[in-house]
Image: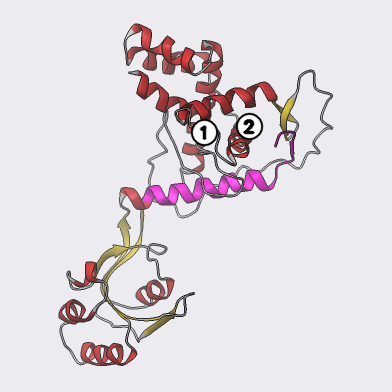
């Protein structure tokens, strides 16, 4: 592994699936040491690991300065400053951007929340597991690359082992939280026509219902030229896939061969758009694409994290 690849790992392990998010925003799943469970389809999401209702004891008088306290567990100022320095180094010396201190602190808080939830779940990462991961990294490059990487990022090997431990814990929690994401879902295949003129839209709807070829009508009239050139075909999609929920709702209310009423949608800019959709196939148990399943896993893990944030008691001491 060369220096550039080690630098990428430094950024990933710093963020630990937090991607320097602010509390409550989306988080990128970064499973680097474990693959989420690929078991059979499940109908329900696994229950979230919520913070306990046990009262948080008063923050003890610190023996060294603190950056934050998360459910009674400290984040030391020295650790925050070290992570901030590493993050800024990743930006190529461009200087500290606005909001980066809050982002880095949020990443550390989120790491603490994940570690606490993992402890409650009984997740164990042994020194042998860390040794194995460390050996993988060492063997990926020449003898001096790893030590150079540590030096560049201001890590001792022991500090980096702690980061790898957090990485392994995070990967295990991703696997557990997303284990219930299904492999298959009900999906429909449909074609649609998008128009900006009400009179034209009504005329096209009447022609479609009179038996004119829907693909031809889409090709000739749809302002969405990307799909229009393909007869308006959207392919198969699941609930939550389309950008216009009114069109999606109409599609899932139809049976194969049926054509919707005229769907009128007025955007925030006041512009009105007209849609007609025709369902060509329904599959009650179609396998999800990799991207679709990943999106569901992302949403599931995001919801779990947001639950941790919502139930956490957090004190901040840096701006």
* Residue for point 32% across, 63% down: 237
First of labels 2, 1 by sequence position: 1
Mark 2, residue position: 112
Give the position of the N terminus as an image quadrant.
Answer: top left
Residue 71: quarter of image: top right
* Residue 156 horizontal/vertical position (percent): 54, 11
Give the position of the C terminus as an image quadrant.
Answer: top right
Q: As drawn, which residue projects farthest toward the front?
A: 94
Specify whether residue 1 is in view: no
Highlighted range, magenta:
293-319
Mark 2, other Cα within 10 Å: few <14 / some 14–19 / many ≥20? some
Element on which disc 2 rests: helix
With respect to residue 46, does 317 lie above or below? above
Q: Nearer the viewer, residue 36 or 260?
A: 260
Element on which disc 1 rests: helix
Mark 1, residue position: 15
Q: Nearer the viewer, residue 212 or 75?
A: 75
Q: Is residue 305 magenta?
A: yes
* Residue 11 horizontal/vertical position (percent): 46, 29
Marks 2/1: CA–CA distance: 12 Å
Q: As drawn, which residue projects farthest toward the top?
A: 143
Q: Is residue 199 magenta?
A: no
Q: Are marks 2 and 1 in contact (CB under 8 Å)?
A: no
* Residue 255 horizontal/vertical position (percent): 30, 77
* Residue for point 23% across, 72% down: 232
Which is the main secondary structure of the residues drawn in magenta?
Answer: helix
With respect to residue 83, does 146 lie above or below? above
Specify whether residue 66 is in view: yes
* Residue 118 horizontal/vertical position (percent): 59, 32
């Amino acid at each position: 592994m060369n220096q550039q690849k080690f630098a990428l790992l430094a950024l990933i392990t710093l963020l630990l699936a937090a991607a320097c998010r602010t509390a409550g925003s989306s988080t990128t799943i970064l499973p680097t040491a474990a693959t989420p469970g690929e078991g059979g389809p499940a109908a329900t999401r696994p229950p979230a690991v919520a913070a306990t209702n046990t009262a948080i004891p008063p923050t003890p008088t610190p023996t060294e300065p603190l950056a934050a306290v998360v459910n009674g567990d400290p984040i030391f100022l020295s650790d925050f400053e070290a992570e901030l320095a590493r993050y800024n180094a990743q930006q190529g010396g461009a200087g500290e951007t606005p909001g980066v201190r809050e982002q880095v602190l949020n990443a550390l808080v989120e790491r603490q929340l994940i570690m606490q939830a993992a402890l409650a779940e009984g997740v164990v990462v042994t020194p042998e597991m860390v040794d194995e991961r460390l050996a993988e990294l060492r063997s990926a490059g020449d003898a001096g690359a790893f030590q150079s990487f540590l030096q560049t990022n201001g890590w001792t090997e022991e500090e980096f082992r702690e980061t790898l431990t957090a990485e392994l814990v995070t990967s295990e929690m991703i696997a557990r939280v997303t284990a219930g994401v299904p492999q298959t879902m009900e999906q429909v295949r449909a074609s649609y026509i998008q128009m900006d003129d009400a009179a034209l839209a009504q005329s096209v709807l009447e022609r479609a219902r009179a038996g004119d070829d829907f693909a031809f009508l889409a090709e000739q009239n749809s302002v969405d030229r990307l799909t229009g050139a393909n007869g308006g075909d959207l392919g198969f999609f699941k609930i939550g896939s389309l950008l216009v929920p009114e069109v999606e709702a109409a599609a899932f209310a139809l049976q194969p061969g049926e054509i919707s009423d005229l769907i009128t949608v007025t955007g925030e800019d006041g512009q009105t758009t007209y849609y007609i959709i025709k369902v060509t196939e329904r599959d009650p148990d179609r396998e999800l694409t990799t991207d679709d399943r990943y999106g569901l896993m992302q949403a599931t893990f995001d919801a779990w994290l947001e639950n941790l944030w919502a139930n956490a008691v957090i004190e901040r001491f840096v701006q």
